[in-house]
Image: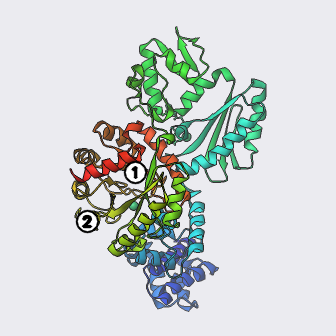
């Protein structure tokens, strides 16, 4: 074993001990030992063989023993056992710049946070601000550190990729020689996570080289991976890869369609074209072998194939061709259809803005209602409301509602679903709310069977109006409950319970892949931002995007109901 590797293991032992909260002298001894060994001019094997290891200052007997084992056998049981006793996510957290093992230990023991994704979410929900030795500033620092860390890993959350891509697209579109330019790929299809940004543009052939040059020199570009005649690949400052293709304008619709994908959609479309004796590819749509069918837009391509225009969100080979061949394509929900916002948090629990600030921000969007849903009592880390605080909040809501003639705050709660599927509040308390969002926040490691039984039981509770973020997943972070979603949806349909589509780009839960089934069972989907601040309300836009991806129309959305309609809906639910 070479000294570098040995030093790394010793350092890791020190880290693991510190994460576990063991004697700080012990963990420091390992970390110092790591440095001392690295500083030796001789390789550890020599030092052990010659016995010199015994005379190195700062390497005590215990360390000597462990180094000897590692160097001679390449293995150390102590290290293996230690590693197995600490969740891997905790070690990963120490990679966040400025976030050492001591802090990891603190958030783990105080808040049960086990990995980077959970930590990030906790910061966003303002949960670290009250923790001893932490604060708002620390939270900010941690978030910056996490962003940095993510820049070095594979996929990206939708909102990050979109935020990186939009200025790029705008720059390209504003180039005087660009005829048209669009985002393609998974971003255009509004997938929940994104591998890379794909942009396609058109120009006169003689201008293409210059546009390529312009693209690779944009200030957002950190690194040029490849630059060819018609395609360049760069890495953006945000750590996301981006491809640009530039083609003559007559080729634009075909390449736009091809690059938008998905691959599955493209494959199905090729099969369909073949059946009609045509051929489709990134190069064009052809009949009689190689006779190009001229198309100015994607709509023209679809039309030539006897199809209605398929919106990019639906291009997942998820029944869109059958629908587009007849008149089965849905008229997808749009942001303007939303009439109110439910499931948000305020300073009563773990939000950053007051109830009044939140309500006024929602009202300023021309909405008719705002359903506040602070946490319930069991969620101590999020300052969940004891029943007395609920009473206080309701009094405040009654006051505020007096001031509005065109708007109403609805009394909601995000009530925890306990391990056995019962709710965190007694029925008498639940009855005081206008509506109840029931969510799981703990014990996500259950078996599929237990998890499904737990949530099914909650849905059957007559006070439950909406099932909140069903699985509790964090995208690119944790899987969440392994629910049998068909059973969950069937049960919700039977009890006329709405299911949330959590609009936070960290969650997007219910998954869009289940929305069509939910729609077919008559379940109303509630697009909820779960926002902990006024800024978070803008996540609604992402939620609507995912709802579109799930084939949902206005009439499938709970909060597309008017105030009067939704109040009736909630009242009727109680009588089920
Ligand atoms: P991702 O992974 O988030 O980047 O997802 P996409 O869909 O953006 O995938 P990407 O960037 O690998 O490729 C862009 C598009 O190119 C894809 O949506 C469809 C098309 N494409 C890529 N590979 C294939 C393939 O093997 N077959 C077909 N038919 N099309 C493909
Ligand atoms: Ca892509
Ligand atoms: Zn929640």
Q: Which residue is disc 2 drawn over?
A: 419
Name the secondary structure under disc 1: loop
Residue 302 image label:
none
Q: Is residue 249 left or right of residue 515?
A: right
Q: Is residue 50 above or below residue 245?
A: below
The image quarter containing residue 390 is bottom left
> Is residue 19 among what the camera can see?
yes
Query: Which quarter of the figure has residue 314?
Result: top left
Q: Which residue is mark 1?
A: 509
Q: Answer left or right for 497 relative to 383.
A: left
Counting from the top left corner in percent of width and height, residue 48 is at: 51, 82
Residue occupying the point 34% across, 43% down:
524
Report crowding for label 2: few under 14, some 14 to 19, many 20 or more residues within 10 A (C-alpha).
some
Q: Is 356 above or below relative to 38?
A: above
In this view, the residue in front, 308 or 316, is 308
Residue nearer the viewer, 60 or 412: 412
Q: Nearer the viewer, residue 261 or 358?
A: 358
Instruction: Look at 39% across and 32% down and name the residue there.
Output: 318
- Quadrant containing ligand 2 reads top right
As helix, strand or loop, the secondary structure at mark 2 comes to loop
**Residue 238 horizontal/vertical position (percent):** 63, 54
The residue positioned 75% from the left and 30% from the top of the image is 208
Q: Quadrant of residue 176?
A: top right
């Amino acid at each position: 074993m070479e000294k570098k590797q040995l030093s790394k293991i010793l350092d890791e032992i020190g880290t693991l001990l510190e994460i576990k909260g063991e004697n700080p002298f012990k963990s420091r001894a390992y970390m110092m030992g790591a440095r001392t060994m690295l500083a030796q001019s001789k390789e550890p094997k020599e030092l052990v063989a010659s016995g010199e290891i015994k005379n190195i200052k700062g390497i005590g007997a215990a360390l000597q023993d462990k180094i000897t084992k590692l160097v001679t056998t390449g293995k150390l049981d102590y290290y293996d056992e230690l590693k197995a006793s600490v969740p891997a996510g905790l070690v990963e957290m120490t990679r966040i710049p400025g976030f050492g093992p001591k802090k990891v230990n603190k958030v783990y023991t105080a808040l049960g946070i086990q990995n980077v994704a959970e930590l990030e979410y906790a910061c966003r929900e303002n949960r670290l601000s009250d923790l001893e030795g932490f604060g708002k500033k620390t939270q900010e620092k941690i978030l910056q550190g996490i962003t940095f860390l993510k820049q070095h890993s594979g996929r990206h959350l939708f909102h990050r990729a979109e935020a990186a891509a939009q200025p790029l697209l705008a720059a390209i579109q504003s180039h005087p020689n660009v005829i048209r330019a669009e985002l393609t790929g998974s971003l255009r299809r509004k997938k929940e996570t994104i591998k890379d940004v794909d942009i396609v543009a058109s120009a006169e052939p003689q201008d293409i080289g210059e546009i390529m040059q312009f693209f690779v020199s944009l200030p957002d570009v950190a690194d040029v991976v490849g630059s060819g005649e018609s395609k360049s690949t760069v890495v953006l400052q945000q750590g996301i890869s981006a491809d640009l293709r530039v083609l003559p304008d007559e080729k634009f619709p075909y390449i736009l369609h091809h690059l938008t994908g998905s691959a599955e959609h493209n494959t199905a479309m090729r099969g369909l074209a073949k059946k009609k004796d045509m051929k489709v590819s990134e190069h064009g749509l052809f009949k009689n072998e190689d006779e190009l069918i001229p198309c100015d837009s994607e709509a023209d391509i679809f039309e030539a194939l006897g199809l209605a225009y398929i919106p990019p969100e639906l291009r997942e080979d998820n029944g869109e061709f059958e629908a587009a061949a007849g008149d089965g394509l849905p008229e997808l929900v749009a942001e303007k259809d939303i009439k109110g916002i439910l499931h948000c948090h305020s300073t009563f629990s773990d939000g950053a803005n007051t109830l009044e600030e939140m309500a006024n921000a929602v009202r300023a969007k021309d909405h008719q209602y705002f359903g506040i849903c602070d946490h319930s009592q069991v969620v101590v880390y999020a300052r969940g409301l004891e029943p007395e605080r609920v009473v206080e909040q309701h009094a405040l809501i009654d006051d505020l509602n007096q001031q509005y003639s065109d708007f109403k705050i609805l009394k909601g709660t995000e009530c925890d679903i306990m391990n056995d599927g019962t709710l965190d509040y007694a029925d008498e308390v639940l009855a005081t709310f206008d509506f109840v969002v029931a969510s799981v926040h703990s014990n996500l490691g259950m078996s599929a069977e237990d998890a499904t039984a737990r949530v099914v039981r909650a849905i059957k509770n007559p006070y439950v109006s909406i099932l909140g973020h069903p699985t509790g997943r964090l995208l690119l972070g944790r899987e969440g409950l392994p629910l049998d979603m068909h059973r969950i949806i069937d049960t919700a349909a039977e009890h006329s319970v709405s299911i949330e589509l959590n609009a936070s780009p960290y969650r997007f839960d219910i998954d869009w892949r289940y929305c069509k089934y939910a729609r077919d069972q008559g379940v109303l989907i509630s697009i909820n931002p779960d926002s902990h601040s006024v800024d978070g309300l803008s996540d609604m836009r992402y939620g609507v995007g995912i709802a579109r991806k799930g084939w949902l129309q206005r009439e499938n959305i709970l909060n597309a109901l008017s105030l009067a309609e939704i109040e009736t809906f909630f009242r009727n639910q109680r009588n089920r």
